[in-house]
Image (spheres, rainbow, N blue to C red):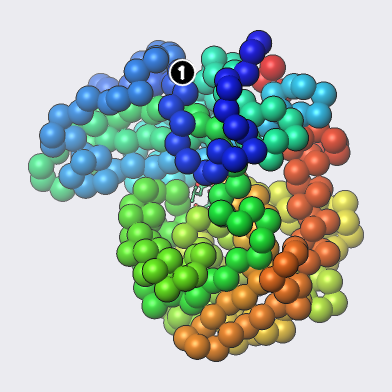
Amino acid sequence: MEKKNLDWEHIGFSYHQTDYRYVAEYKDGAWGKGGLTRKADIVLNECANILQYSQQVFEGLKAYTTADGHIVTFRPDQNAKRMADSARYMEMPAPPEEMFLEAVDRVVRANAAWVPPYGTGATLYLRPYLFGTDPVIGVKPASAFQFRLFCTPVGPYFKGGAKPLTLCVSDFDRAAPRGTGHVKAGLNYAMSLHAYVEAHDRGYDENLFPDPVTRTLVEETGGANFVFVTKDGELVIPKSASILPSITRRSLVEVARDRLGLTVTERPVALAELPDFAEAGLCGTAAVISPVGKIVDHGREICFASGMETMGPVLQKLYDLLTGMQMGTIEAPAGWIRTIL
Ligand code: PLP
Ligand code: COI
């Protein structure tokens, strides 16, 4: 199969309209049969719940070309499960796991020409999403929904590629106490946009959102979880009920312990202890592992020992392990890799 003629090394993290996407509809209490369509536009009633009350959840995962030329995805069953959790919380019917996985497989196969070749640093980003479609004017859940999945080839999420990021501690909240921070609802991202623009205008790459109750603990950024490394080489993961349970982070915790023999502690992390860490990073599907060089907390600069040029040694080991598993050069734990082609 001939690949699309794109400058794979320089595509950035932006939307390219690909050939096929998956759509399935839920109405009268049941999912209909889903299928592929070439149509990227969606026609909705003006009063559709998604347009008025933002009843929407989504997922993000990637397809990778492996060193030996296969196309694989990484733990898509975990995305299906998280979408089901998000949907339950947002009073929506989740697509069954088989439907979710069928959508992943079919969209990747149908758009195989768009899957970036091995070694380009680009991957195919898959965006499953679920939203309320029927008209509601009183505030209540929809009764009709669409589940869709499209894909787009992407490069690194952050502009500098692997260059360490500079973050600022935000004055805004991304998640409300006992709100939706732990589910992947579009409304969390809407809520982070003002903070994102403010941070960018002030020259920062991203926000560190503190916990919404005490504002003394590290939560996450708008689109990734944190990982920290102590001066003794131990991994510390912020624990909180209002951060998104990142599949990348959960995978890293497992392989850091089992493959690298690292001590991993998941616990609340105070902003006050940030200067004690040797390395800091962001992890997620889009972020992969992106090093953080500096965090600015209202004029107080916290510079990590790993510096502003490269990733620290422990995070680099984790990065190599994670991307090696995704690209098929390192064996992943059983069941983590789904071969599509
Ligand atoms: N946190 C937020 C707010 C996110 O949007 C994402 C991306 O999905 C993550 C963390 C990382 O999660 P995952 O590793 O499952 O992609
Ligand atoms: C992902 O990593 O898949 C996300 O959804 C994060 C988003 C900011 C692109």
Position of 281 relative to 183 (above/below):
below
User: What's the residue type where badge 1 is placed?
Assistant: Asp
Which residue is situated farthest in the top direction here?
1
- Tell me if 89 is positioned left or right of 119 in this view: left
Residue 287 image point, x, y percent: 60, 52
Screen quadrant of the C terminus:
top right
Residue highlighted by disc 1: 19
Residue 27 shows up from this direction:
yes
Position of 216 relative to 180 (above/below):
below
- Tell me if 64 is positioned left or right of 20 in this view: right
Residue 31 shows up from this direction:
no
Which residue is situated farthest in the left direction here?
137
Badge 1 element = loop
**What residue is drawn where x is 64% and y is 53%?**
161
**What residue is drawn where x is 33% and y is 64%?**
194
Q: For residue 165, what is the image quadrant?
A: bottom right
Screen quadrant of the N terminus:
top right
Residue 197 image point, x, y percent: 37, 64
- Tell me if 274 is positioned left or right of 216 in this view: right
Residue 275 image point, x, y percent: 67, 84
Give whichever of 233, 304 is nearer the camera: 304
Position of 126 relative to 181 (above/below):
above
Classify mark 1: residues with Cα within 10 Å, few (<14), some (14-19) or many (20+). Answer: some
